[in-house]
Amino acid sequence: MPEHFQLLLWPSEQANPSQIMRRLEGRTAKFILKNLRQNRQHPWCEKTLGRLKLPATVHDEAHYRVWQRRFYDGNVWSEKKRLEKLNYTHNNPVMRGLVNEPGDWPWSSWRFYFLEDASILPMDPLP
């Protein structure tokens, strides 16, 4: 999705989902901001940087905010619910009118699960 992502993860017993998300958001925010800064010659990059800039009244060490402060999580306790969430995730770009088929969305795990293709988005299958 252009403005959010959906993630199904199966953390180990020692893992903390909040820490996983914090690290994922931190790494991706740095990557996104670096690329936007390096490509300011493109008007949409400059415009996006402007939208991400925090107002001077925000007392934080950061000057930009890429992700919202909170993520919305939910526990998946059954195979039925896991498949429901996976299907929703795969069909979301279609429902939003971004693509015609789930496999057309390049950042989807659909190709991994249904074509066993990890060339664009490598991942570990959920158990």
Image: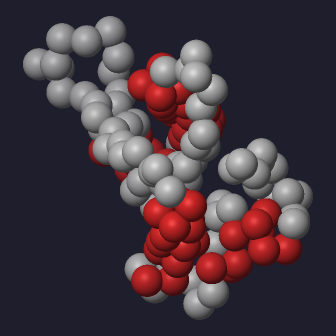
Please report the residue visible at 78 percent of the width from the left and 74 percent of the height from the top: 114
Between 111 and 16, the one lying in front of the other is 16
Q: Report the number of numbered marks.
A: 0
Q: Is residue 69 left or right of residue 25?
A: left
Q: Residue furthest front?
A: 78
Q: Is residue 117 above or below residue 51?
A: below
The percent coordinates of residue 127 (x first, y second) are: 71, 48
Relative to 32, residue 76 above or below? below
Left or right of 69 on screen, residue 57: left
> Which residue extends farthest left?
57
Is 42 positioned to the left or the right of 61 in the image?
right
User: In the rendered image of this protein, does residue 27 appear above or below residue 68?
Assistant: above
Q: Residue at x 55, y 49 (%)?
A: 8
Residue 119 found in image quarter: bottom right
Q: How far across and down, in percent of the image, does residue 52 sit?
A: 34, 38
Q: Nearer the viewer, residue 51 or 23?
A: 23
Please tell me which residue lies in front, 96 or 16.
Answer: 16
Position in image of residue 92 (x %, y %): 47, 74
Whether residue 53 can be seen here: no
Image point (35%, 28%), residue name: 64
Residue 91 can be seen in this image: yes
Residue under the image location 85 percent in, 57 percent down? 118
Q: How is the image coloured?
A: secondary structure
Quick one: 75 or 26, which is closer to the camera?
75
